[in-house]
Amino acid sequence: MFLGHFGLAYAAKRAAPAASLGSLFFAAQLADLVWPLLLLSGVEHAEVTHGATPLLDLVFSEYPWTHSLAMQCAFGALYGALYFLARRRVRESLLLGLLVPSHWLLDWFVHVPDLPLYPHEIARHGLGIWQSLPFTLTIEFGLFAAGVAIYLYATRARDGIGRWASWGLIGFLVVGYLASLFGGAPPDIATVAYSALIMWLLLPWAAWADRHRVSRGDK
């Protein structure tokens, strides 16, 4: 799952209007933001395997700290608590805390069985929707389009930055996702990890664009 995580973050803005879109992106994609760092450090492991699924030439062999349900719940509780200490906003804190483990749930729908419930669990979980390219694209773009629509309905641009930076981010996410699917197999796992680090740049972009938008009810 890629676009679906961002779609959920966009939709969450309506329920938590005081939270920055950058904070919502961070929560929804925390697992994938930390994963390349642990991959490069050798703590977690993946391999480039041509034809692993119709979508990806990757096998996620071991990622217990970023992609186990138990750890995502723990990180979600920590993130929500830290946000509350900083902002004293109960609704936003709870929603951000829940967004973190929502990553595991959305991944569970699409991943082939490779997701652990807790670190180093022997069993692996996943419904395997990745085995069908049309079904996967329908779910990814459906969730993303719904989330973006909710965000755009709940907010309005207060200037050109709020309009064009937002649409530029949406377009970048779509193009980036399609490029990852149809751009060919990566040469090695280090290339995958360094490419994934680009996602960190999306956080300030999202926060910047969101600062130039206001809730529809605001004047």
Image (cartoon, rainbow, N blue to C red):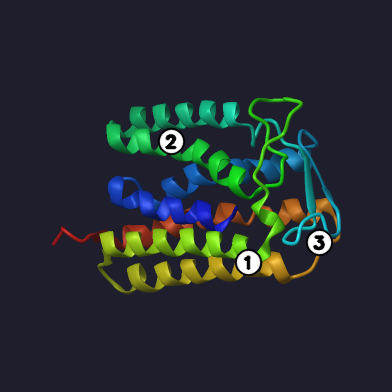
Q: Position of residue 52 (x, y in %)?
A: 81, 54
Tag 2 residue? 98
Q: Residues within 10 Å of mark 1 (few under 14, many from 20)?
A: few
Q: Counting residues from the N terminus, which is met first, the one under dot 1 or under dot 3?
A: 1
Residue 125 drawn above or below residue 191: above
Three-letter amino acid code at the position of disc 3: Pro
- 30 displayed left or right of 211: right
Point out the residue furthest to the left here.
219
Tag 1 residue? 134
In what quadrant of the picture does the C terminus appear?
bottom left
Residue at point 36%, 70% (across, down)? 161
SS category of the residue bearing label 3: loop
Q: Nearer the viewer, residue 49 or 201?
A: 49
Three-letter amino acid code at the position of disc 2: Leu
Q: Which mark is residue 186?
A: 3
Give yes or no for contact between labels 1 and 2 (Cβ–Cβ under 8 Å). Answer: no
Q: Position of residue 189 (x, y in %)?
A: 82, 51
